[in-house]
C-alpha cells in the first residue's frame, strides 16, 4: 500500500450545471493515483453527456449508468466496482481542494494506514461567504469509540475516507431508499473502527442553498426517515449492549430534539413520535444514562422546547407530554 490508490465515488443526478466543477477538482488533483467512479443515477438532463465527455479524455474515469435509485444506491454501485485502497465520496454538486488526496496520502502513510480518516469542510455560499469547519480535537490516531466520544461527530459520509478492505470485510453499506442515509452508516463505521485519524484541515467544499437539493425540501418521506434513523441507531446501540455512552447520549438528545423540531409540521411530529414509540425509548435510554446528563437535558433542552411550544394550547399539550417523559426517565433512572 506504499502508493495508495483512492477510489473516488461521485453520485450524479440532474446536476449538469454543477458537475464540471466537481470533476475538474478531482482530475486536477496534485495526487494522481485515483480511480474516479462517476455514477449517473438516471439523470434526465445532460449530466451523462458531460460525464462521457470527461471519460473520453481521462482513462482513470469509470462511468456507471443506472436507473434512478437514490443517493445510497448510487454510492453502493460505486463501491461494488471500486478497486482502490481507500474510498472517498463526493456529492456531484460539491468539490474538493486540489491538494486533498496528496495531503491525505501523506497523513495515511505517516500513521500506519488507519481504517478511517476524518477531515474538515468549507460551507460555501459564495466567494465572499464561506465558513471552514474542522474537529476541535488533536490531530492524531484514536480508537473509533474514543474519537466518537471526544469529537463533536459530524455524520456526513463525504467528510471522511474509508479503507476499502475494512469497509467490505465488515459488510458496510448505505441503506437504499432512506433519506438521511449518512447517519446510520457513519456512526457505526466510526465506532467499529480500530483506528481513526483526524486531519485538522478543510478540503471539502459543501455547496449551500442549491434550490432543488433534497436537503432544502420537506416531505412526508423525509420526515418519516428523520424519525426512523433514530430507531436504527437505537437498534445498533442495543447490539452494542449500550456500551458506547456517547452514542446513548446522542440518541437521547436526538429523540427529544427531533420531536421538538418546529420546522416540521406538528401533526407529523405527533404521528411519528407515537408510531415509533419514542416515549418508551427515551425512558429506556434515560435508565442507562448518568443522572448529571439527565439533569442537564432537563435544564437546557426542556425550557427551550417549552418556549417553542407555548404558542398554542395544542403545542403546550405536546410539551407537557415531553416533560412527563423526562419525569418518567428520572424515575426509571432512580429505580
Image (cartoon, grey):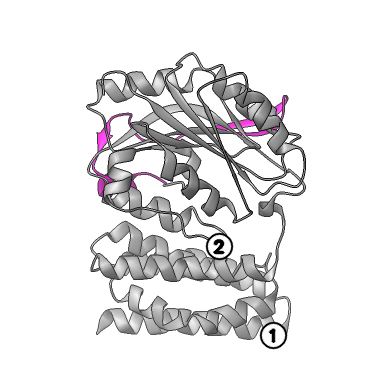
Q: Quadrant of the N terminus?
A: top left
Position of 194 with respect to 121 (left or right) is: left
Residue under pointer 1: 314
Q: Up-down: is 48 above or below 299? A: above
Mark 1 touches mark 2? (CB < 8 Å): no
Q: Quick one: label 1 or label 2, which is nearer the N terminus?
A: 2
Dividing the picture into quadrants, the one containing residue 96 is top right
Q: Residue 238 in the image: x percent, y percent?
A: 29, 70
* In this picture, residue 49 sits left or right of residue 148: right
Residue on which disc 2 sits: 177
Q: x%, y% of residue 222?
A: 63, 65
Direction from residue 174 to residue 262 in the image, left or right: right
Frontmost residue, 225 versus 6? 6
Q: Residue at x 69, y 64 (%)?
A: 263
Region rendered in magenta: 123-152
Task: Relative to 205, say whether 234 is above or below.
Answer: below
Q: Whole-percent x and y of residue 107?
A: 33, 22
Position of the C terminus, as image quadrant, is bottom left
Amino acid at each position: 500500500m506504499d502508493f495508495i490508490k483512492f477510489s473516488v465515488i461521485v453520485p450524479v443526478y440532474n446536476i449538469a450545471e454543477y458537475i464540471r466543477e466537481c470533476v475538474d477538482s478531482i482530475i486536477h488533483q496534485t495526487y494522481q493515483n485515483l480511480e474516479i467512479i462517476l455514477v449517473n443515477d438516471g439523470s434526465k438532463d445532460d449530466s451523462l453527456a458531460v460525464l462521457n465527455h470527461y471519460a473520453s479524455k481521462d482513462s482513470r474515469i469509470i462511468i456507471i449508468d443506472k436507473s434512478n435509485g437514490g443517493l445510497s444506491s448510487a454510492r453502493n454501485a460505486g463501491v461494488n466496482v471500486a478497486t482502490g485502497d481507500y474510498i472517498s465520496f463526493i456529492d456531484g454538486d460539491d468539490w474538493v481542494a486540489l491538494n486533498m488526496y496528496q495531503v491525505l496520502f501523506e497523513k495515511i502513510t505517516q500513521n500506519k494506514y488507519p481504517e478511517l480518516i476524518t477531515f474538515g469542510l468549507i460551507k460555501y455560499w459564495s466567494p465572499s461567504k464561506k465558513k471552514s469547519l474542522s474537529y476541535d480535537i488533536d490531530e492524531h490516531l484514536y480508537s473509533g469509540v474514543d474519537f466518537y466520544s471526544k469529537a463533536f461527530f459530524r455524520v456526513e459520509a463525504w467528510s471522511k475516507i474509508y479503507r476499502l478492505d475494512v469497509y467490505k470485510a465488515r459488510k458496510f453499506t448505505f441503506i437504499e431508499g432512506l433519506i438521511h442515509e449518512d447517519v446510520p452508516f457513519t456512526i457505526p463505521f466510526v465506532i467499529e473502527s480500530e483506528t481513526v485519524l483526524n486531519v485538522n484541515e478543510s478540503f471539502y467544499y459543501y455547496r449551500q442553498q442549491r434550490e432543488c437539493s433534497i436537503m432544502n425540501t420537506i416531505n412526508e418521506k423525509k420526515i418519516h426517515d428523520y424519525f426512523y434513523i433514530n430507531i436504527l441507531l437505537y437498534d445498533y446501540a442495543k447490539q452494542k449492549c449500550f456500551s458506547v455512552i456517547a452514542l446513548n447520549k446522542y440518541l437521547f438528545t436526538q429523540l427529544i430534539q427531533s420531536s421538538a423540531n418546529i420546522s416540521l409540521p406538528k401533526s407529523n411530529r405527533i404521528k411519528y413520535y407515537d408510531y415509533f414509540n419514542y416515549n418508551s425509548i427515551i425512558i429506556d435510554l434515560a435508565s442507562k444514562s448518568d443522572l448529571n446528563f439527565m439533569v442537564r437535558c432537563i435544564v437546557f433542552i426542556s425550557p427551550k422546547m417549552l418556549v417553542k411550544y407555548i404558542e398554542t394550547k395544542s403545542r403546550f399539550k405536546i410539551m407537557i407530554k415531553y416533560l412527563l417523559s423526562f419525569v418518567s426517565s428520572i424515575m426509571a433512572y432512580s429505580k
